[in-house]
Image (cartoon, rainbow, N blue to C red):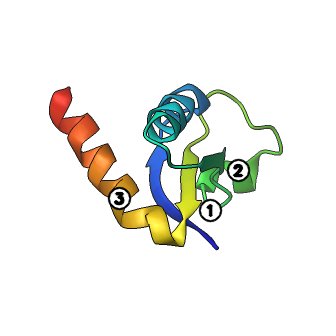
C-alpha cells in the first residue's frame, strides 16, 4: 500500500523528489494534492497546485530519511 511521505509546492519539485527517490531504488508516485483548498475552488490543476509524493509503506522510513538528507544538502 502506498502512503504519502511528503509534499512539494509544484509538479516540477515533486518530480525532482520522485527522481531522487527512484535513483536510490525507491519507487515513488506523485499526484496533485486533492486536499488542497485551491483545487476545491477550481477544476484546473495550474502551476500553483501542491503535489504529494507516495511510496510503498515498507519503504516510507527509508524514503523520509533520504529526503531529510536531501534537505540537509541544500
Closer to viewer: mark 3 or mark 1: 3
Which element is circle 1 on?
loop
Residue underneath mark 3: 62
Residue 56's mark?
A: none
Query: Quadrant of residue 70 in the image?
Result: top left
Left or right of residue 33, residue 72 in this image: left
Q: Nearer the viewer, residue 17 or 62?
A: 62
Residue at 61 percent across and 56 percent down: it is: 37
Q: Position of residue 39 (x, y in %)?
A: 70, 50
In the depicted structure, whether residue 74 falls above or below residue 7: above
Residue at 49 percent across and 44 percent down: it is: 25
Residue underneath mark 2: 39
Q: Nearer the viewer, residue 49 or 52?
A: 52
Left or right of residue 19, residue 70 in this image: left
Q: CA distance from mark 3 to mark 2?
A: 30 Å
Residue at 52 percent across and 63 percent down: it is: 4
Which element is circle 3 on?
helix
Q: Nearer the viewer, residue 43 or 8?
A: 8
Q: Position of residue 44 (x, y in %)?
A: 81, 38
Query: Quadrant of residue 5 in the image?
Result: bottom left
Q: Nearer the viewer, residue 49 or 17?
A: 17
Q: Earlier in the sequence, mark 3 or mark 2?
A: 2
Q: How many marks?
A: 3
Residue underneath mark 1: 35
Q: Position of residue 33 (x, y in %)?
A: 62, 53
Contact flag, marks 1 and 2 (Cβ < 8 Å): yes
Left or right of residue 41, residue 73 in this image: left
Amino acid at each position: 500500500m502506498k502512503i504519502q511521505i511528503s509534499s512539494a509546492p509544484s509538479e516540477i519539485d515533486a518530480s525532482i523528489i520522485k527522481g531522487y527517490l527512484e535513483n536510490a531504488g525507491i519507487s515513488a508516485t506523485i499526484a496533485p494534492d486533492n486536499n488542497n483548498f485551491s483545487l476545491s475552488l477550481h477544476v484546473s490543476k495550474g502551476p500553483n497546485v501542491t503535489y504529494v509524493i507516495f511510496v510503498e509503506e515498507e519503504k516510507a522510513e527509508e524514503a523520509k530519511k533520504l529526503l531529510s538528507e536531501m534537505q540537509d544538502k541544500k
